[in-house]
Image (spheres, rainbow, N blue to C red):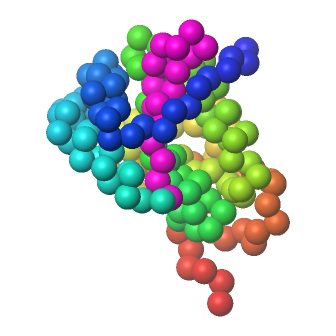
Amino acid sequence: MKRSLSFTPALPHHAPILHQLYQDTPGYFALLGGEVPTLGEVQRDLLTVAEDPHRQLELIHEPGGELVGSVDYKTEYPDPGDLTINLLLIREACQSQGWGAEAARQLEERHARRNRRILASVLGDNVRGARFWQGLGYRFALDARPAMTWYAKDLGSSSATRRPLLSSPAR
């Protein structure tokens, strides 16, 4: 079912909203063996995002305006024409309702003209996360365990030369 989502760039003054989202999703941080970031850590991260022209962190709202999640991604990484999703986080109360799949679909659609592929990193031993990306047509691309695994999906819209994940530029 297609539902229109709103993506709002997260700016430093949105730190309390993002922090609340993280608090509402403790299972993700527990899976990684860590604690929910503090408000100060979220504020510092948003300042870092603001200084990086390739990194984006967006808040995701459902049509009624409720915050359902966030997406943190980087363009032109690891290679030109790539977009790498560092984290697509859906609030625990909103999970298993199709919001994550719809957010990924809309992100793909928004960036298809400028990017040849999208990569998704899955941190730690997150079997559910790996299944999520595979269910959306992403294929296993790189094993960097124990830290992460990467999944990739070609968008097919660019004539850019295809290179293996994390390759050196062609010479």
Membership of 64 in magenta stretch: yes
Q: What secondary structure predominates along the stretch shown in magenta? A: strand
Q: Is residue 74 left or right of residue 157?
A: left
- Which residue of the protein is positioned furthest toward the front in this rendering? 13
Q: Position of residue 18 (x, y in %)?
A: 34, 29
**Residue 135: which quarter of the image?**
top right
Q: Position of residue 31 (x, y in %)?
A: 29, 31
Q: Which residues are magenta?
A: 54-71
Quarter of the picture containing the C terminus is bottom right
Q: Is residue 104 above or below residue 44?
A: above
Membership of 136 in magenta stretch: no
Choose between 82 and 162: the one closer to the eye: 82
Quarter of the picture containing the N terminus is top right
**Residue 64: which quarter of the image?**
top right
Q: Is there any visible trace of residue 22 in the rendered image?
A: no
Q: Residue at the location (62% across, 23% down)?
A: 5
**Total marks in image:** 0
Q: Residue at the location (17% across, 39% down)?
A: 40
Q: Is residue 165 left or right of residue 3?
A: left
Q: Position of residue 95 (x, y in %)?
A: 48, 16
Q: Position of residue 70 (x, y in %)?
A: 45, 31
Q: Is residue 135 above or below residue 162?
A: above
Q: Residue at the location (75% across, 72% down)?
A: 161
Q: Is residue 107 above or below residue 157?
A: above
Q: Residue at the location (39% across, 40% down)?
A: 11
Choose between 151 and 50: the one closer to the eye: 50
